[in-house]
Amino acid sequence: MSIKNRTIAVVCGLALAATALAPAAALAADNTGTTKVTVQAQEPSDQDPSAGQLSFTVPTVIPFAAKANGTLVGPSADKTQIVNKSVFPIHVTKMTAAAADGWNLVDSVSSTSSVTNQLSLKFHGATASSAGVDLSHDNYWNMGYVNSKNASVNVDPAGDVANVNLDLTTPNKAATITWTLAAGAAPQQ
């Protein structure tokens, strides 16, 4: 082989090598990548309905005493708390009331009404209703993560009764309150 052919072969080989190295050289200049990481509270699924449950406690009983004028006197604030036991903030989104047999849930009681066994309940100023009360935008119902200084909220129970013809000498179940909670803080209005 002649020197001219060898020179052409070497030049071609060097050109091929340079072409092959170009992408590697380009990668060497930018050899990093990024990955976005997200975290959210797990939602329940058909396969594992308990997977998404938030961890919290609500008052199991709120014992009221009825005064002669119909005002209900409830327990102290520290006895009526919703407490977050999750490692992330949560908030109450809805409160729904169901009157027990014999009771009639009303927005406000009236002694001049013909309705017997009237019951009006308020929790932190929100009147309990069988249709439910939307609390999802009320910042009062926000709770911080477990063991934080704001991991609980007081439900501040209050109420009134009127035209009662039930025996109240012993505790009488009057209603059930269902609290609905969600992960995160209440959205700002």
Image: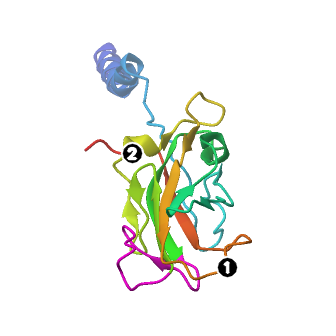
Residue drawn at x 65%, y 74% as measured from the top left: 173
Q: Quadrant of the C terminus?
A: top left
What range is drawn magenta here? 99-116
Residue drawn at x 41%, y 19% as measured from the top left: 28
Look at discs 2 and 1 and give the one toward the viewer.
1
Taking the image as shown, residue 42 lies to the left or right of residue 61, namely: left
Q: Is residue 179 above or below residue 9?
A: below
Mark with earlier residue (2, 1):
1
Near-viewer residue (9 or 52): 52
Amino acid identity at mark 1: Asp
Mark 1 secondary-structure assignment: loop
Would residue 67 be visible to someone looking at this image? yes
From the image, tell me which residue sits under label 2: 186
Taking the image as shown, residue 163 lies to the left or right of residue 23, namely: right
Numbered mark located on residue 167 in the image: 1
On the image, the x and y values in percent for residue 45 come to 58, 68
Q: Quadrant of the N terminus?
A: top left
